[in-house]
Amino acid sequence: MKKPIWIVIVLIMVLAISACKDKKKDDTLPVGEEGESQVTLFAPLPSFKAVFTALDQLESRDISAAIPTDMYKTKQDPYRNSFALGVLTADAIIAVRGRNKSKLMTIANEMMRITTLLNLEAEVPQLNDDIKTLVEKEQWSELEQTLDKHKKVVEDKLWEREDLDQYTLMVLGGWTEAANRVSWLINRNFTAERTKVLKQKGTWNDIYSNMKLINSASIVNEAYYKPVLELIEKVKAVLDAEIEGTYSLTQTEEILKQTDLIKAEFQK
């Protein structure tokens, strides 16, 4: 009669130890308001390249005109740098599509500098050398692939080490600049058909949700945080007001304006 009792006691102890181990493992992850791991709450976000299909029908000289005259720079802190890296990645791809060698090298140098500041240089140690070699050979398709790889490696590493705030800000930077530059190009020679690429409502909803999940005091207490949230809401409102999958000139001008303001907030 005693043996079954001891078996039950042993089973209870095993289950208790296992539960403690699981709890300890969960406690190492950032948690949400109801105890959920932040990794499960944050949405993985797609590449902004979908917006760049608008560039496919344009001449390289027209695309090159969309590269900002002044390279985007912010104050030097990890979170602003993450946003800036996203912006510059979008600008670098525009420079490739525009066959603008000098702008591309300048942007790539700044990208590598920021990557180093974010302690990610080990992930992409030869970015500048690779780009320089490909530029000299004018291998434009390979250049774009190299930039795509750099972007993905950095975003994957931020996600892997659970720097989800920086991950979100970097992706926000890329999507903000993509929407901004494509809107600028569309507005130069407007047709409603070309605006279809801007219809990325799901992604902007996920970006907004991720931004709302950020709880780092180094971000939420910064002057840019609340205004940027409000500006993202304004972009979302424009995107939600589509007209049979397209947008009016007034709407694309509004997207351009709001994304300009998002970039400006991170520079304050």
Image (cartoon, helix red, strand yellow):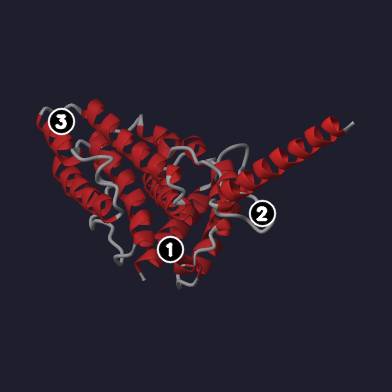
Asked if marks 1 and 3 touch (Cβ < 8 Å), the reply is no
| Mark sitting earlier along the chain (3/2) | 2
Instruction: Find numbered disc 2 in the image and state the secondary structure of the residue it sits on.
Output: loop
Q: Residues within 10 Å of mark 1 (few under 14, many from 20)?
A: some
Given the image, on which type of amino acid does mark 1 rest? Leu
Q: Is residue 225 left or right of residue 14?
A: left
Tell me: 125 left or right of 119: left
**Residue furthest left in the image:** 136
Residue found at x 33% / y 64%:
77
Residue 231 locus on image (x, y percent): 52, 61
Circle 2 is placed at which residue position?
A: 35
User: Does 9 sit above or below residue 217?
Assistant: above
Query: In front: 48, or 27?
Result: 27
Q: Name the residue tied to disc 3.
A: 134
Cα gap from disc 1 to disc 2, whole angstroms:
35 Å
Q: Residue sitting at 65 percent across and 50 percent down?
A: 36
Confirm whether residue 68 shows in the render.
no
State the residue in front, 262 or 252.
Answer: 262
Q: Quadrant of the C terminus?
A: bottom left
Q: Is residue 217 above or below residue 5?
A: below
Which numbered tag is attached to residue 33? none
Q: Nearer the viewer, residue 254 or 136?
A: 136
Mark toward the start of the polypeptide (1 vs 3): 3
Percent from the top left, x then y, of residue 99? 20, 36
**Residue under the image location 69 percent in, 56 percent down:** 34
